[in-house]
Image (cartoon, grey):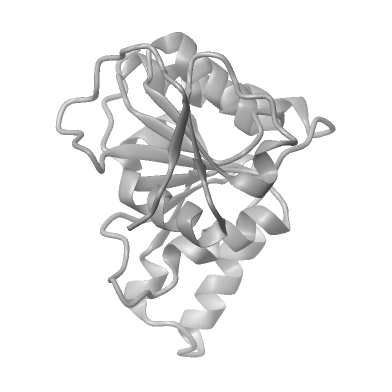
Amino acid sequence: MTRHMLAQHAPAAKPAAGHGPRGAIGLLSSPGKEIPETYVEFASALGHRLGHAGADVVFGGDGSGALGAAVRAAIAGGSRVTNVVPAHLMRHRVPLAGCAVYVVPNDLDHRQLVRRLVRQFVVLPGGLDTLAALGTHTARQDHGTPSEPVVLANLDGYFDPLTRLLDRALQERVITTQERHMVADAETVDEVLDLLRIPRAE
């Protein structure tokens, strides 16, 4: 059984309708401050909408860049936010105010806990670590595959090369149709919410 430590309690927030213990939205992105402002604005708008929809949010980053903007907006909007962090990274991070922080022993426990908490992931523009996390959460595992597709926030066509690669992989029969359907993309916040089955209402 995964052992974890609760480092900080989050304020109570109204959960989204139909969300259960494994009902959170997971956010994936890379840390970094020198990214296009449009990415930060998109992430902030997404976090705002998730917060006002009452969606629970889970992330594993350090609260910088576009990911941090999304998380802070979600907290401000009323989301219950959880940060899952491997112990070896915790000493380099300052927890964001208003979220619960779970420190786990290692990266394997990190992946397992995140998968238990999250029903669906949104991938914001990021680097190799983001792509690695995308692969982790979409790859076939002994315990099954995600029931909902991972959503790429394809702002300004950022993920177009990746979607073309996946289409080519399907054409060449390197992946199955089921595996291809595990990754969807959306160009606007409204389209992301639709794929998450979250009402668009502000």
* Any part of residue 157 in sight: no
Q: Residue furthest right?
A: 34
| Of residues 9 and 69, the one drawn nearer to the viewer in this rendering | 9
Where is residue 11 drawn, in percent x and y?
38, 11
User: In which quadrant of the rendered image does the N terminus lie?
Assistant: bottom left
Judge from the rendering whether residue 138 lies leftward or rightward of residue 22; answer left or right: right
Position of residue 58 relative to residue 181, above or below, is above
On the image, which quarter does residue 62 sit in? top right
Position of residue 156 relative to residue 47, above or below, is below
User: In which quadrant of the rendered image does the C terminus lie?
Assistant: top left
Where is residue 163 drawn, in percent x and y?
56, 63
On the image, which quarter does residue 96 sit in? top right
Q: Residue at x 50, y 62 (%)?
A: 108
Q: Residue at x 63, y 27 (%)?
A: 68
Where is residue 34 drawn, in percent x and y?
84, 32
| Of residues 193 and 18, the one drawn nearer to the viewer in this rendering | 18
Q: Residue at x 42, y 48 (%)?
A: 114
* Any part of residue 41 in sight: yes
| Of residues 105 and 144, the one drawn nearer to the viewer in this rendering | 105
Where is residue 164 drawn, in percent x and y?
59, 68
Total numbered circles: 0
| Of residues 120 and 192, the one drawn nearer to the viewer in this rendering | 120
Q: Residue at x 62, y 43 (%)?
A: 29
Judge from the rendering whether residue 120 lies leftward or rightward of residue 164; answer left or right: left
Position of residue 140 relative to residue 18, above or below, is below
Position of residue 193 relative to residue 26, above or below, is above
Q: Residue furthest bottom?
A: 173
